[in-house]
Amino acid sequence: MTTNPPTHPDLSVFSDDPFFHELMKSGRSRLELESQSLASRSRQLEDETRGMAFDHYSTFISAADCCHDIAGQFRRNQEQVSALTDDLPKVASTCLDFHGKALKLSEERKKTSMVLANHTKLLEVLELPQLMETCVRNGHTEEALAIIQVANKIGKPLGGVPLIDGLVKSIHVSAVWMLNQLLAKLKTQIQLPECLKIVGLIRRMGAFNEAELRIKFLQARKVHLDNILKSLPNTDQLSLLSKMVEQTRIGIFDTITQYRALFSDDETRFSGTKSSISSYRMIFSSWIYQRLNKFQEHLVEGLNQLNDIQGLEALVDQVMYFGQSLGRVGYDMRILAIPKLNDFAVRCLQNILDQGRTNLKEVLANSQLVYDFSIYDKIEHGPKAEGEFQITYYPVAIVYNTIIQCLNQFRYRMSVTTAVKIKSSMGSFLSDALEIIKDFEVINAKQGPLLQEEMNESTIPHLNGLIDGLGNDFVRG
């Protein structure tokens, strides 16, 4: 058995003990006696402890059991404390979540309280789309414009809010509907005061800039004028042309009056790009020229469907009045319409002359008439009245009546170019008539010279005298 070497006790533990200080002051004899005293005292304490244990055995057992129970409870408490320590982060997280939800519920409660406090005003705002639709349907444009202004005022600061965005979008849809209604009214027959009101409303809506507003107005009036022309009654072609001219004149002048009352094109200018600046006047001028081109198309189309020149003089006067009226506002179109009328007149003249040639050939080709020439004999006439011209033979009368019919058709004022064309056509007709009669002389040598004699000596000189107003004399036989 080994013994541990003696160790020096740590005396600093007893530095403050009075008994230790007392021993330090005692001598050796006192220390030896003190050791025996301490041993005796230790045996005495052990005896007292043993006696106490025997005397109080049940108490020690109870104490031991109690200590065991207390130790078990301490262990359980430790386990519960450990479990609680493990659950504390979850509890903290749950508390934070609860705090966040509580804050959200508080905010929602505040919002709900605010909504409840402003329930009447909010209800008025939510009813704006329905009210806007009702106003547009019933034609209350002023009230609809006020609703649009309110919607714009609400939408600017509250943009991005789904409810407000949907409300503003619904109102804008109704605004587009109202705009289409106003544009549709411009396509109907309207008076100047109503036109001023409608364009003013469109301008206040801010849907178009000034250039676009002018274009939309002119497009609407174009549709109105086209609808009028399409609805003209399908009577005879000449009456249809006359009504077309009249309705075009009225429609264009109504548009000019309304446009000048609505817009000012004298000083204002707009720029499409920095390098190109165009006057507003060009928009209106383009519209006028477009309508005049359309008018010429209708005029040419109508004239092509006419077969005779009867009644053309009234139509010409109507077109000239139309052009003269437009000339007062700087859009005289007579120089464009006159060639169309003159071409039609020359075409009608040519038809008359062609029919005269055909009739002359048919009469001279009829064998019965050729060999039974008695119907061409001179007829006894009474004394001729002043200015009266008498024709002896029927074929010559056909030539004479053809020229007279042409001259009677052309009583209206014509251009020099048209007069030259008429002169050339009539000259060709007389030359052809003489050639036809000469060919007849080959068939009938007796009557042919008589017809030529009357043509050359009296008929052609007389006809040349009648057509002096159209230019130089026509060709003589």
Image: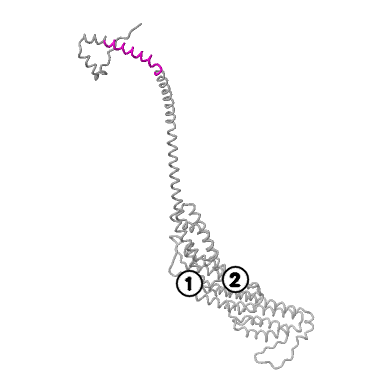
Q: Label 1 amino acid?
A: Ala
Q: CA distance from mark 2 to mark 1?
A: 23 Å
Residue at 43% over, 24% down: 75
**Residue nearest the viewer, comparing 410 with 225:** 225
Residue at image point 74% right, 78% down: 362
Q: Main secondary structure of the magenta part?
A: helix
Relative to 133, does residue 114 appear above or below in the rendering?
above
Q: Which residues are magenta?
A: 37-59
Q: Nearer the viewer, residue 148 or 29?
A: 29
Q: In the rendering, at what x and y percent does residue 298 appear?
A: 60, 70
Q: Nearer the viewer, residue 238 or 368?
A: 238
Circle 2 residue? 228
Residue 164 appears left or right of 440: left
User: Residue 261's mark?
Assistant: 1
Q: Quadrant of residue 4?
A: top left
Q: Upstream in the sequence, badge 2 or badge 1?
A: 2
Reply above or below: 395 against 169: below
Q: Identify which residue, 460 or 224, lies in the foreground.
A: 224
The secondary structure type at the circle numbered 1 is helix
**Image coordinates for residue 68, horizontal then vertical, percent:** 42, 21
